[in-house]
Image: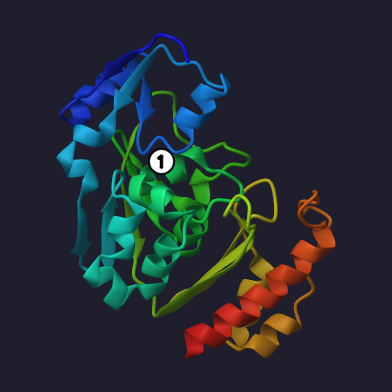
Amino acid sequence: MYPFTLERPASVADAAKLAAAGGKPLAGGQTLLASMKLRLSAPEQLVDLGGITELATIKKEGDAFVIGAMARHLDVANHAEIQAAYPALADLASRIGDRQVRAMGTIGGSVANNDPAACYPSAVLASGATIVTDQREIAADDFFQGLFTTALAEGELITAIRFPIPKRAHYEKLRQKASHFPLVGVFLAQYDAGVRVAITGAGNGVFRHTGLEDALNQRFTPEAVAAVKIDASDLNSDLHASAAYRANLITVLTQRAVAKALG
């Protein structure tokens, strides 16, 4: 690697000042440190967020969970209240990557990175969650803007994510065995206002599928999903799977998710 300085602020305010001055925030480091080792990223200063206690809290506020940006995947997976009230979210966290990634990776880091095949963005988008930063609050529908791109401004820090608790929800994915990322992942959540379906791994970023949402708002059944045609023209095609295969996976995984959500 190469020389850089490491700062470890004790408060969000201090971290924000360092980030605003050009410091690169370091959360779990599962993506950033690997990029630095490959010299794909070369920050002169790292701002380690691991010492900010308030960023690691998980609490239930009314009909929502507020999860701090530095909450590890295992923290979410093992949280008793989330397991009871939003089991789909706990289950998703329990199956991210491998044991090391789950022990070190954070929800804020995953969402800020916005990898097109990451699991967490699908939960955030399907939940209609709110991304809370040191400067403002951003609706999930406005946050994800394409390949590794979000609405975050330079130096803006995610401090928490607020997840409304759905009536029912489920996450299904087909894991790519080498990388542990999903070839396709489908997260669906049903609220009084309707069903939200978010797809990850299939395109250049996480996205909602309005055709599936419309069908499930009419009839929340696997048969309703089967009647929806999935357009493969904008889906990824690579050495792991063709666009047509990913389109079929969206149908199959959504059907499974609906069936399991129904119990």
At mark 1, the secondary structure is helix
Q: Which residue is tagged 1?
A: 109
Looking at the rendered structure, the kind of residue marked 1 is: Gly
Asked whether 75 or 200 is in front, the reply is 75
**Few, some or many residues within 10 Å of mark 1 (<14, 14–19, 20+):** many
Q: Residue at the location (40% across, 8% down)? A: 3
Residue 147, position as x, y percentages in the image: 63, 39
Q: Residue at the location (22% across, 24% down)? A: 8
Left-right relation of 163 to 187 = left
| Vertical comparison of 184 with 69: above or below | below
Question: In the rendered image, which quarter is residue 233 located in?
Answer: bottom right
Q: Residue furthest top?
A: 3
- Does the rendering let one see residue 190? no
Q: Residue at the location (61% across, 85% down)? A: 218
Question: In the rendered image, which quarter is residue 180 located in?
Answer: bottom right
| Vertical comparison of 230 with 113: above or below | below
